Image (cartoon, coloured by chain):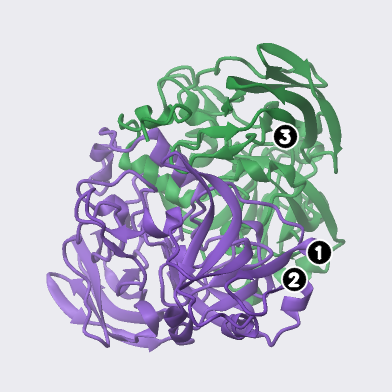
Chain colours: A green, B purple
């Protein structure tokens, strides 16, 4: 393999960088296949997974959702009752907050994502806000907590996975209560039988295997809300919460791969490079630039299916013989652009540095 | 984390063992979630993937299969014509030949599977043998080759993924030509729109994205047939081919996990341990033994859905406080049993060493 001039990756294969625990997370938390970025909807089974604990297997026929705490009219609904609510289906792009972590230096020890923790699915459910209003939350409510059925330990702390949203978040975000994905029932690993989708925010907010919504008259202090998913400059920094997805773009790597190194090879020809771009909170993509032969050139935007779905882009490239280092960079309508070097934080969150792809053209 | 007595994995996290290229393969080639071993059929999207090159996206409406070479009556069929053949649906357990590779010492550099490259799906298709007979293979045929649409490089050699079966293999194996999985059309990453399933053999034989079947009057020498997937004792050993799945068993790890180390924790109680066992070529499982408190005890076999599907097993265990090192070991009806130490080969194939699970009981 080392004799092969277009496979420089063979050399780096000799240097172990990642721990067994990181690999153990990579087995479980599967990533998108970048060649399938040509698909508007990520094929079922290739949407990224980030599950903190074991996937619970829940019988849908006995599952119910309980709204409790500081509500004037707390209640429970069976899954069948929830599925009788007004139904909507929306494509939403989700990204793991830890996407890009493996590109940070020093690399935080957690799931070592490079670019793959991304996906767009057609989610079927009902708007959540009316169901919360029906329970008549008290005016003193500070947080609505969303608790899943998945249980385990993190840093020695046992807990059900839980996250919260403030009343203001609930008013601003179009949160969905979801039971379907890509025209089929939710799969176990995606939160069956019931989850929420918080469009425009990183995936940690979209709690799976939802069992309980609790209204709190104080701020929620669950582990996944206050200990993790915060931007911290150093370990003692209380930090700020991770929420909105940062602007980002990815390209389908051109050419064909080498099996082991995933180095890309192609013949000299005119090709159309394709990819996707997205930003948080439904903010549209304004521009995607692609680095071709050392020059940033504007790609054509091919649109998006819905407010919270990614935007397609494409650009023609005359690939000439030699090594080419490609990159893509998106800017959103608020002027946010991808950085050329990662913004460091101790958790390795929200790394939206530009993707770089090396191609060998013969 | 290091202060937590039931999380010894924290220490090993400090030692990098795996290369970036190995991790790159782990992003793409997702594994089963062992907690879902309780499901007879692996939930869609959690069946293991091992794709050598990029997943091709193929339009089903224009796809066809061509039978060519040493046939007296070569022909092509559209996908629609193939789907009009007699339809069968069978649960088949598939395992990657490289499953367990990361447990070999020294570890061969390739996809570093530990236990996860396993899955059982309901495959829908038609028996392949009658379609090959219809093309009237010449008596001189030595190999039938199965060529996929996936293309790339391995060790500098460009090729479409291809494998072969001899006329005798075709007579003995119940090879299926498959267009459906778990009641839905094949997904792109599982070979859409057409693949074969070779029940009882490791997954490398079950060619995806099938385009061509060629009858050869000499032996097939494609890269994936002669260069890889062979048991070699050393690099210059011509070796013997990998084919039949070796007897194996896995358990659902009891208790709940720590997020990062995946260490298992549970409270002292009587629990029912559950798992699956399987062997190659449809050979039934005769016995599963589970190592409990230092003693191998026979588990109850709970049966299998079909000849090529895994067998369930379970055993009760009175978990007492302390650290417990569990293991499971299957024996098939031919007397093949799992080894306690891996059988080494240079490619890291067919490692069916017993699974070991450490649990901390409080």
* Front position among marks 3 and 2: 2
Tell me the quarter of the picture where residue A2 sits: top left
Q: Secondary structure at mark 1?
A: helix
Q: Secondary structure at mark 2?
A: helix
Residues A84 and B235: in front is B235
Q: Is circle 3 on the same chain as circle 2?
A: no
Tell me the quarter of the picture where residue B284 sits: bottom left
Residues A49 and A38: in front is A38
> Disc 1 and disc 2: Cα gap in Å?
7 Å
Mark sitting earlier along the chain (1/2): 1
The reply, left or right, for residue B79 in relation to residue A58 is right
The reply, left or right, for residue A6 in relation to residue A188 is left
Q: Is residue A28 above or below residue B86?
A: above
| Residue A139 image position (x, y, % from top left) | 76, 41
What residue lies at 78% left-to-right and 74% top-to-bottom? B80
Indicate the quadrant containing the N terminus of chain B: top left, top right, bottom left or bottom right: top left
Indicate the quadrant containing the C terminus of chain B: top left, top right, bottom left or bottom right: bottom left
Q: Secondary structure at mark 3?
A: strand
Mark 2 chain: B
Q: How many marks?
A: 3
Which numbered dot is residue A195?
Answer: none
What residue lies at 69% left-to-right and 68% top-to-bottom? B65
The residue where tag 1 is placed is B61
Which numbered dot is residue A275?
Answer: 3
The residue where tag 2 is placed is B79
Mark 3 chain: A
> Disc 3 and disc 2: Cα gap in Å?
29 Å
Whether label 1 touches label 2, CB < 8 Å: yes
What residue lies at 79% left-to-right and 31% top-to-bottom? A313
């Amino acid at each position: 393999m080392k004799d092969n001039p277009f496979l420089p990756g063979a050399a780096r294969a000799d240097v172990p960088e990642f721990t067994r625990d990181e690999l153990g997370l990579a087995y479980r938390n599967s990533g998108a296949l970048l060649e399938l970025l040509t698909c508007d909807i990520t094929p079922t089974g290739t949407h990224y997974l980030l599950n903190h604990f074991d996937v619970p297997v829940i019988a849908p026929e006995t599952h119910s959702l309980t709204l409790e705490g500081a509500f004037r009219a707390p209640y429970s609904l069976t899954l069948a009752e929830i599925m009788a609510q007004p139904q909507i289906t929306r494509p939403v792009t989700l990204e793991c907050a830890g996407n890009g972590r493996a590109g940070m230096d020093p690399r935080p020890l957690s799931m070592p994502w490079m670019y793959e923790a991304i996906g767009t699915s057609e989610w079927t459910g009902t708007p959540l806000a009316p169901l919360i209003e029906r329970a008549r939350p008290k005016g003193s409510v500070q947080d609505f907590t969303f608790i899943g059925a998945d249980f385990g330990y993190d840093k020695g702390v046992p807990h059900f996975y839980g996250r919260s949203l403030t009343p203001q978040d609930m008013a601003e975000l179009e949160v969905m209560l979801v039971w379907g994905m890509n025209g089929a029932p939710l799969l176990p690993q995606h939160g069956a039988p019931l989850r929420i989708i918080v469009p425009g925010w990183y995936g940690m907010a979209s709690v799976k295997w939802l069992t309980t919504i609790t209204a709190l008259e104080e701020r929620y202090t669950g582990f996944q809300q206050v200990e993790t998913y915060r931007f911290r400059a150093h370990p003692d920094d209380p930090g700020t919460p991770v929420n909105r997805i940062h602007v980002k773009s990815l390209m389908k790597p051109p050419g064909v791969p080498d099996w082991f190194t995933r180095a890309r090879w192609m013949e000299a020809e005119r090709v159309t490079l394709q990819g996707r771009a997205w930003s948080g909170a439904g903010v549209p993509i304004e521009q995607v630039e692609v680095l071709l032969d050392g020059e940033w050139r504007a790609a054509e935007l091919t649109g998006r299916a819905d407010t919270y779905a990614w935007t397609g882009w494409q650009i023609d490239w005359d690939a000439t013989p030699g090594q080419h280092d490609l990159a893509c960079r998106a800017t959103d309508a608020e002027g946010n652009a991808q950085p050329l070097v990662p913004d460091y934080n101790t958790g390795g969150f929200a790394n939206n540095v530009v993707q770089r792809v090396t191609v060998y053209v013969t």
